[in-house]
Image (cartoon, rainbow, N blue to C red):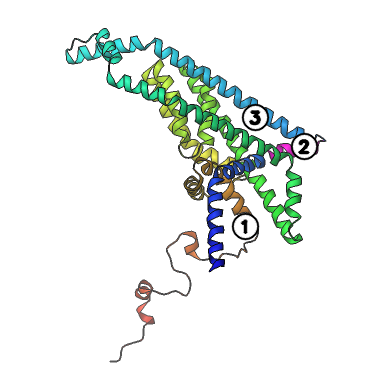
Amino acid sequence: MVLALALIAVFQLGTWAFHQLTGLLINILIAFFLALAIEPAVSRMAARGMRRGLATFLVFLALTTAVAGFVTLLGSMLAGQIIKMVEGFPGYLDSLIRWINDSFHADLKRVDVQEGLLHSDWLRTYAQNSAAGVLDVSQQVLGGLFQLLTVALFSFYFAADGPRLRRALCSVLPPARQAEVLRAWEIAVDKTGGYLYSRGLMALISGIAHYILLQALGVPYAPVLGVWVGLVSQFIPTIGTYLAGALPMLIAFTVAPWYAVWVLVFVVIYQQFENYMLQPKLTAKSVDIHPAVAFGSVIAGTALLGAVGALIAIPAVATLQAFLGAYVKRYAVTDDPRVHGHRGRGPGVSGPLARIRRPRAAEPEEAS
């Protein structure tokens, strides 16, 4: 009884500790996959004589500069659009009031509408809720920055001390297991790096295509919007395409309503081209998994770890599939028509239709 109570107490303590450390474990998992993604670049620079820590620092510096530049451009674009919409709000309101007066024979005035909005209970309640939610937003921003710093720190150590980490892991395993661990690590590096690099290439192609369209339509901030569409559509699974196309459509609508329709049509057509033509060719070697398996892995990853699981699900499943493929024994497939999708029966198989189709001469004669 004492032993059973002790085991229950240890289990409860372990469960409590796991729930308390879930956030840290997820950050470590993200950092590990990020380190696997930059491992080829770091190893290539280290092979040319550069210290591994310096190579990792240079890779992180390049990534940080690119992200900071993109965020700065996107923030300036959004700020400019917000200012433009605020300045043009009286004109939009006048157009709406004019349409209502002409369509419904009303006698609305802009001054009355503005006073009604300023003195409405809805606006007062919204302002109070916004003021009360400023503290919560600040806490979430600080928490996000702390998580980002944690992921960056662990990623740097995983990438810079990758060989030392592999030696420490192999030192507690027998030689046969060491070879399997190193093989799994190599496959994980190839699949994760290949997945992210193929996604980066598709993001570049998508960004250039959408930039050309937006520039031809005269939509402002076309370069930033092209980068936005490329990154969001490729690195946010399942719903990334819809999130990526919403912002260009909104800004194109401020220029001309029909431009938003053209952007929507182009986004849909390009998405089909990418799904059936571009993506299979670019990911055939890096992430060779069936689309249904990829979709199911994204759903399972989302259910387990949320957005993080959706992002790392495909490289994780590709790594597992490639690792198991080296140990699963394969056999030659029999030459049966049913293998190729034909509905004919194989040799030696009989059925009702086969018996009907037999020549009557082959049947035994009935006794007279």
Which residue does the numbered mark 2 point to in the structure image? 52
Let me know if residue 344 is in the magenta part.
no
Q: Is residue 177 above or below residue 69?
A: below
In front: label 1 or label 3: 3
Q: Is residue 30 above or below residue 103?
A: below
Q: Which mark is residue 130?
A: none
Which residue does the numbered mark 3 point to in the structure image? 63
Q: Residues within 10 Å of mark 2 (few under 14, many from 20)?
A: many
Q: Which mark is residue 325?
A: 1
Name the kind of residue labelled 3 in the image. Answer: Leu
* Residue 65 drawn at (x, y percent): 64, 25
Quadrant holding the C terminus: bottom left
Label 1 SS: helix
Q: Is residue 257 above or below residue 43?
A: above
Q: Is residue 142 visible?
A: yes
Q: Is residue 289 visible?
A: no
State the separation of the CA atoms marked 3 and 2: 17 Å
Q: Are marks 3 and 2 in contact (CB under 8 Å)?
A: no
Q: Quadrant of residue 63?
A: top right
Q: Tell me which segment is drawn in magenta.
A: 38-48
